[in-house]
Image (cartoon, rainbow, N blue to C red):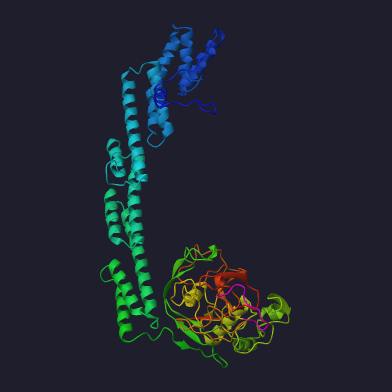
Amino acid sequence: MRADGEVTVSGDDAIAERLTWRSPEIALIEAEVPAARQRAAKALAADRLYEDVESAIPLYLALLKRDPADAAAKDGLQRALARLPAVGDAALAEAGEDADALRRAHAVAAVMRSVSGARGPEDAAYLERLDRADRLWELNEAAEQALADGRLDEGDGNALALFRQVLTLAPGQPRASQGVAAVESAMIRRAEEAAVRADFVQAERWLAKAKQVRPGMETAEAGRALVEEIRRIHISRLRDEGLALLSQPQRPNHLPWARERLAELLRIAKPGDPAAAELRTRIDLATHYGLLRPGQRFTDGLQGGGRTPQMVVVPHGGFRMGARDAEPDAGKAERPSRYVRFDRGFAIARTEITVAEFRRFVEASGHRPRAVRRGHSLVYDERGGNFVRRSGVDWRHDAFGRLAADDMPVVHVSAKDAEAYARWLSERTGQRYHLPSEAEFEYALRGGEPGRYPWGDHPPRPGTGNLTGGGDRSPGGRSWGNAFVGYSDGYWGPAPVGRFRANAFGIHDLEGNVSEWVADCWHDGYRRAPTHGEAWVNPGCRIRVIRGGAWSNSPAQTRAAWRSQAEADATNALTGFRVVRDL
């Protein structure tokens, strides 16, 4: 007996209990006999034969116990016993998938054995059918366990062989038929997993097996289509990585690495694959002629005079966006990382938009920026070493609230101000200018570098950008509490645009100087984010994304995957912007 008082049943006792039925005790007095007869007849008519004291067989047995010569009770009992095989068969019809139905079928057999000894031919036939149902149940359970253990079609007692044995004994049984389909699905899943590992030989092996499980069904062909889609993604990634390497001739070993991508692509591609042919052709061109168009600089003329900011053509391709799984300082908002592909290149401003460029827009358009209308913005207060609100500060001022020089990055602008500037460029040029999407910004920021920082996994080298350096000092002698040790850039606050080394795509200041507005609405992570580089926008969203390090950001906030959020109307001394132009 268990501690809770419930009696436990041993294995042998459980079998005995299943084979034995004991009628409920019913004591009748003479006055109760007529009512008992009526209840028994009513129960018999409803096929409620044995379950409780209101069932037909217990009532008839009680009547016979009181009067063994009761002819009506004998007749009722025989009719009830004659109904048992039909009631049992009804349970057996559901017993293939329902354990409760199988238990009811066994209960019927127990009643047969206990009351009549199951001596009649119909009883014997029913017991044979019950034995067959037990065998089918055991085979199905063994098959399902083999499936769960991953023993699909090989070795003794594999799932497919056991399910087929059931179907030989009971053609078309739903449980076993579903089991066979589950084996087919498991084989297709293994094919897909092999494809994800780029093992397409193994994938083909599992697809061939799956096709033989249910010949004539289209499931395996659907699995083949998915494997081919995975193959296409692998091929596109390898092609894009190869093209990205070719677009950076200044990188050491860019040609050997591109050839490695081609070799891997040829290993998994089918003969005549166009991506392999394209990459081979581009490698040949790069070997002999180099690439001329990616990295090209240009400006567009503005109606009414003047020109746009200088733009740089970014090569099309793809990259892994977001933080790596084990990346230090990374947060949930930077994951899951995912592969993003740009089918077309785009042009991005070579530097942040300057005070002079923004002034031309304000004067030509009459736009009143947010800080002008509000009458204040956040500036850096050196005395307190923090950011404070100051009246009378707007886009014409620098990070400290002083009038800014024309070549300084414009700050104290909101996301809506930045979008108004991009719309003005579009109207004045006939081209489509806009804020970069978050994917475009990170792609341009990384410049083909997959490391923790935009320049790689190592500390910044001299001239990398306007970053928080351990060697930086404010005019009043302040130093950074959280900075790149040993680094100094000579600035405490934003620097004039373009003063630091460009990245591999020829773009300046993405990694530092000022952070920048992008077009995306804020989401807490990248799950379900677009994969073709477009902005992730919810109509009417108020919270926007800010990307790229700034002059006062910690090293953790200078990582390539770092992202932050702010109200679309926010303005401060840390955030500016640049624009993208579609090609």
Residue 83 visible? The answer is no
Task: Determine the image quadrant of residue 163.
Answer: top left
Q: Identify the residue at the far bottom of this view.
A: 305
Residue at position x 55%, y 11% in the image: 32
Above or below: residue 170 compared with residue 11: below
Q: Give the prevailing secondary structure in the magenta stretch.
A: loop
Which percent across, then down, holds residue 55? Answer: 48, 20
Q: Which residues are magenta?
A: 473-484
Which percent across, then down, holds residue 311? Answer: 50, 85
Q: Is residue 251 left or right of residue 360?
A: left
Which percent across, then down, holds residue 488? Answer: 56, 81
Which percent across, then down, holds residue 577? Answer: 58, 79
Q: Is residue 230 left or right of residue 487?
A: left
Above or below: residue 72 compared with residue 571: above
Q: Is residue 483 magenta?
A: yes
Q: How many marks?
A: 0
Q: Is residue 476 magenta?
A: yes
Above or below: residue 227 compared with residue 286: above
Task: Determine the image quadrant of residue 121.
Answer: top left
